[in-house]
Each structure stands twice: as C-alpha cells, then as structure tokens.
Image (tube, grey):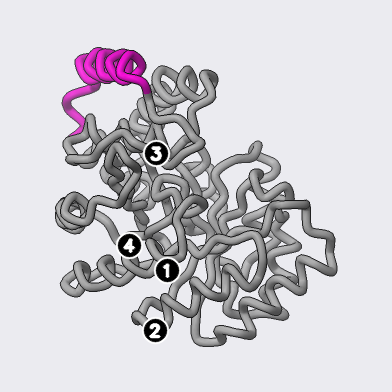
Amino acid sequence: MRIPSYLVSVPIPLNEDQSFDKELFTEILGELKNQYCDGLYLFGTSGEGYAITDEEFLEIVAHFKEQTWDFQGFLQVGCFGLSSAQVKLRCGVCMEIGIEQAQVTLPFWKELNDEELDLFFQDICHSFPDMKFLLYNNPRNKRKLKGWELENIHKKYPNLVAAKTGSGNWMEIFELLTNSPSINHFLTEGAFPFGSMIREVGLIPSYNYIFTDRCRMFFEAVISSERERAEILHTEIMKFHLKTALPLLNKGYIDGAIDKAYARLGGLNIPLTVRSPYQSLSIKDFEWLKDEVSQFKSGLVKDLSR
C-alpha cells in the first residue's frame, strides 16, 4: 500500500442469472493490468464484496491471484462480514492463496461501541499478524472513525496500516489526516487535491473507468504539484460526477451499479448486472448515462500538455 499510489477496484462481471462470469473476469483483469494502476483490489463497493458468498470468494480470489502473477503493483482483497468470524474466514483464504493485504469494514448490523471496536481489531489483527489491513472508513458502517481513533487503534494493532475514506467535509478530512500520522490514507477524487496539500495520500478513483488517461493525469498533476493542470482536471471530474453520478444516486442506485455502467462505457466488456436485492441500471437509465457521457466528452479541454 505505497503512498502516494493509484489503486483501482476490479468490478465483478455477473451474468443475468447473477452467476460469476470467469471468462469476462479474466478479460477485465487483463485490461486493468495494462492501464496505469499501482494497485488492484477486489471486493470493494464496485466489486460487491458485501454480496459475495464464501464459495464465490474462494473461487474469485484464487483466480485473481493466478491471473495477476505478472502484475507489478500491489494486490488487495476486501474481506467483509457482519462478525469477526466471517471476516477471519476470508482473511484466512487470502493468506492461504498468498495475498497479504486485506480491506475490511466494521461490522454494521449495529454500530460498534468502543469495547466492540477494540475487540474487532484484536480479533482480526492478532489472528493475522502477517497481514496488512486497510479500513474502508465508510458511513455505511454506522460508525465512521476519526483520525485520533485510527491512530489509537494502530498503536495497539500496528498491522492496521491504512484507511480509505470517500466522504466528509474539509474539516473532517483535515482532522483525519493530521490526527492519524501513522496511517496511510486513500481518498477519492473530490478530496484528493485537498488531502495532498496536508500530506501524501493515495487515490481510489471511479473516473478511471471511463477516462483512464485523464484520471491518471489528474493523479500525477496533484502529486507533482502541477497546480493549474490539477485544478482543471479536478473541476472536470467534479462536474462529471455532478452530471452523471448524483442523479443516479438520487434515484436509489448503489454506487457499484454506477461504477459498472462507467466501466462498460469506458470499454470494459462487463454486464450491468449487480447482485440482488440491489438494482442494476435500467436500459433507459444506461442510455441516458451514455448520452450524458457523450456530451461531456465533447466539451473536454483537449490540450492539457501545458
């Protein structure tokens, strides 16, 4: 989990009957490996890690490892569950296969109190001392940890080494980054330039699916302090999400369904199907998105060489 780095989520192709499509998955991995990723990870929101069965988890992680033998970046797998036992089972699968970086979320059937929070990290981190853990610091966990809380957990359980945070106002992001100096942080596109002014952070983008070159250019511009180019691209990305993602989120679609649509429009051969009970984009909404993306592309700044 190098910092700064560009970490891309692998969407999982599902057939209409919601079965895993191994051939398409192999094809998608091949495409992503040839892009500008520093790391690839399975089973975040885009990979529907919350919806995968244990049997599917074993099959997909094993195939992921097998197909990335020639990938020079780092690999990470989301090990989600509603109990320590469920998370530990999936971490054990990763260790046996040879993947030593795991992304976890807090169990979210109820909000964890302080004692339960400590017990969760004790269960996970002590059970797998050779693994490195990233916490997906997600409001869906019901408890979103602050920087000082992450720092205290790291002091007790040093193999919690990173966190991904995709939401929060500027003061919350500032507190997070300044009060957990021992933790590596990954942000999404909106907060990435601000976070990079405070300290080195990584980027986990969704803009990458459609605008691979421009998204990587944004990352490089921010970390190399090319302010003018970074501001142009940041504004572009925010306008894109305002124009495309926000209307679909307001319709009730889960963000993974939108990411799959982005990936398809970006050229990946992936069905729109997401795991029930969540809704895949309707044909009508996908066609709307396709038209919006086409219009957006036509208005992009062409020359960003300066």
Q: CA distance from mark 1 to mark 4?
A: 8 Å
Element class at badge 2: helix
On screen, 160 above or below 276?
below
In the image, residue 169 lies in the stretch drawn in magenta: no
> What's the residue type where badge 1 is placed?
Met
Q: In which quadrant of the rendered image does the N terminus lie?
A: bottom left
In the rendered structure, which disc, 3 or 2, sits on the residue that comes first in sequence? 2
Q: Which mark is residue 96?
A: 2
Tell whether label 2 touches label 3 (CB within 8 Å): no
> Circles 1 and 4: CB distance less than 8 Å?
yes
Give x and y (percent) for residue 41: 37, 60
Is residue 189 shown to the viewer in this render? no
**What's the amino acid at mark 3?**
Val
Secondary structure at numbered mark 4: strand
Q: Which of pointers 3 and 4 indicates the residue nearer the eye?
A: 3
Q: What span is in magenta?
A: 282-306
Q: Position of residue 100 (x, y in %)?
A: 42, 78
